[in-house]
Image (spheres, rainbow, N blue to C red):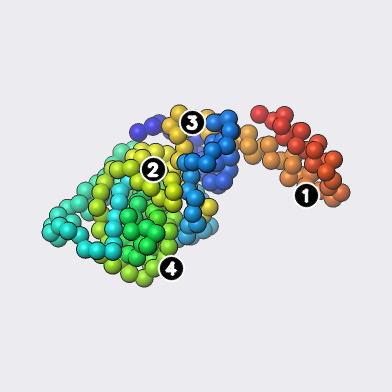
Amino acid sequence: MPAISSDVLAALRAADTPTVCNALEHVMGGRTAEGFTKMPVVCADPHLPPIVGFARTAKIRASSPAQQPTTAVRALRMEYYEHVAAGEGPNVAVIEDTDFPHAIGGFWGEMQVAQHKGLGLAGTLTNGVLRDLGMLDEGYQVIAGSVGPSHAFVHVTELDCVVSVFGMVVRPDDLIHADRHGAVVIPAQHIERMAWAIDVVMRKEVPILTAARAPGFTVAKLRAAWAEADGIG
C-alpha cells in the first residue's frame, strides 16, 4: 500500500473532489479524461466532508441468488469484512455492483453502514444501491449509484480485485478521493505532491474570483487577473 503523510492527508480531507482533480492535473502537467467518475452519484449525506483512503475492493450482485451454499456465502462475507478492515488505513470500501446499470439490490443500508463505520472505514464508493435513508449512522458517507428499497439477492462475489465504478477503474490500494461530485484516483507517484498542488490551484483562483466579484469588472480586468494567476506556481 502506498504511504501518505499526515500533511497530505489533511490537505486532501480539506479539499473537495473538483479541487483535487484540478490539483492532480497541475501535478501531471496537463488535463486528462481518465481516472475519475463519469456518471452522476447519490450521497447518504451531501454535507459530509470528502472520503479519503485506500481502496479495499470487492464485487457484488443482487439480481440472482448466490450459486453456493449458505455457509459458503456467509464465509465469503466474513472474509470481506476482514479484507476491508485490514491494514493501517485509512480504508475506503470500493464496491462494484456487477448488475450496474440495472442494479436492484441495496448492499448499503443501516446494517452495513454501522458495521463499516465500526470497523474504522473512511467511507464507501459504489455504483450499487443505497437504502435506509434517515437511519444511517451519522458521519459515514456512502456515495452510490441509486436509491432503492430492497436488498434482493445481494451477495459478495469477489474480493481484492480490479473494479469499475461509474467509468473509473480502481485497483486494490489505489488512493481514492470522493465527495458528492464523484471520485478520483490519485496515482501513487503523485500522492506526496498533492498538498502543494492543492495550495497552488486554490491560490491561482483568487485573483480571478476577486476581480470577477468586484464592482466594475471588465474584460481588461479579467486579462489582468489571468496574467496574475499565471504567475502563481
Task: Name the residue carrying label 2.
Answer: 170
Marks 1/3: CA distance?
33 Å
Q: Secondary structure at mark 4?
A: loop
Q: Position of residue 133 (x, y in %)?
A: 42, 67
Q: Amino acid at mark 4?
A: Gly
Q: Quadrant of the C terminus?
A: top right
**Dot in front, 4 or 3:** 3
Task: Measure the C-alpha gap from mark 4 to mark 2.
Answer: 29 Å
Of residues 232 and 100, the one drawn nearer to the viewer in this rendering: 100
Q: What is the spatial separation of the Cα atoms under label 2 and label 1, in whole angstroms?
A: 39 Å
Q: Which mark is residue 134?
A: 4
Disc 3 designates what residue? 190
The answer to whether residue 138 of the structure is visible from this angle is no
Q: Which mark is residue 213?
A: 1
SS for callout 3: helix
Which residue is drawn at the image coordinates 49% and 54% (left, top)? 39
Q: Is the residue under label 3 in contact with that under label 1 (CB below 8 Å)?
A: no
Amino acid carrying label 2: it is Val
Q: Nearer the viewer, residue 131 or 118?
A: 131
